Amino acid sequence: MIDQIQQRILEEVADLHEVPEGAYNIRTNGQMAGRNTTTNIDIVSKIDVSGIDIRIKPGTKHESVHIPVVLSQSGLKEMVYNDFYIGEDSDIVIVAGCGIHNCGDQDSEHDGIHRFYVGKNAKVKYVEKHYGEGDGHGKRILNPGTEVYMEEGSFMEMEMVQIKGVDSTERKTIAQLAEGAKLIVRERLMTHGSQHAVSDYIVELNGAGASADVVSRSVAKDESYQKFNSRLVGNAPCSGHTECDAIIMGTAKILAVPQLEANNIDSALIHEAAIGKIAGEQIIKLMTLGLTEEEAEEQIVNGFLK
């Protein structure tokens, strides 16, 4: 059974207010709490390691898969491996996410590897949200790894969101794109207190006409630390763009490391990086409308991370 705390976290990380339609696998405190398959989407538990295989039949259209994870037991640490086999010509939405509620003194940690095998001409939207809460001294730690293997003509959009309560995270994402494949990544990140967050992307454009657009928007508050490392590798006639746009506040630190590697004369690669504080005139303008300075800052930050 899912208790009230777990239900609230499911709402935060997967927008689930009730049992979702379609295929799903809900994991709470290291155990399966619910699963449903459909005619076109099968979910099977792995035998050798903790995790699941999700197999989507070719031609599957307008279906969804929800695979949220909740940790509400202090001191629990787990590692899972989830593999997605997405059939060609399919068009699906995958919603993942992990929430940790820690009111104890021990650290709680969820590490996971998600591997996506995207078939020819398939379309995937992947949403991954991370969230932490709890008034204990134990840390809330999330270390996601993502591997994406895209076949010819496929398309994948990844929305990676972490805006509250995670003490430490190291996100590592690698992608390999075949001819005509297109990858879009939109990362939104906020750290506060003494939180630590590292995002590391490596995208290899291996086929003619492959393209990638990797963009991170982040806010670092208080004494938190962020590192954004994005590397685009052009091994064929291709196009790629990566961008880091960050707001720094308090005594926080941000390191942006965009990298481009062109191994083909027709690789067209661009990188951009901007880090700065909130402009004073923006705050003053909102304060003239009746907001306090703190409220004005919050409005600006929320708008920036949308």
Image (cartoon, rainbow, N blue to C red):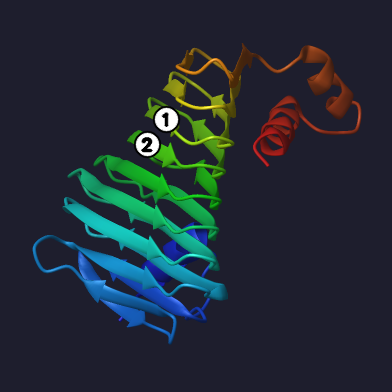
Q: Which residue is mark 2?
A: 174
State the residue at coordinates (27%, 67%).
53
Q: Is 272 above or below relative to 218?
A: above
| Three-letter amino acid code of the residue under disc 1 | Tyr
Pick out the residue farthest to the bottom: 39
Which quadrant does the N terminus fall into? bottom left
| Secondary structure state at the residue bearing disc 1 | strand
Which residue does the numbered mark 1 point to in the structure image? 201
In the rendered image, the vertical position of residue 245 relative to residue 128, given as above or below:
above
Camera-side residue: 24 or 157?
Answer: 157
Q: Position of residue 301 (x, y in %)?
A: 67, 32
Q: Residue furthest right?
A: 288
Q: Are marks 1 and 2 in contact (CB under 8 Å)?
A: yes
Q: Which x, y percent locates residue 58? A: 46, 72
In this rendered view, identify the residue nearer to me: 136 or 72. 72
The kind of secondary structure element at disc 2 is strand
Is residue 102 something one can see in this rendering?
no
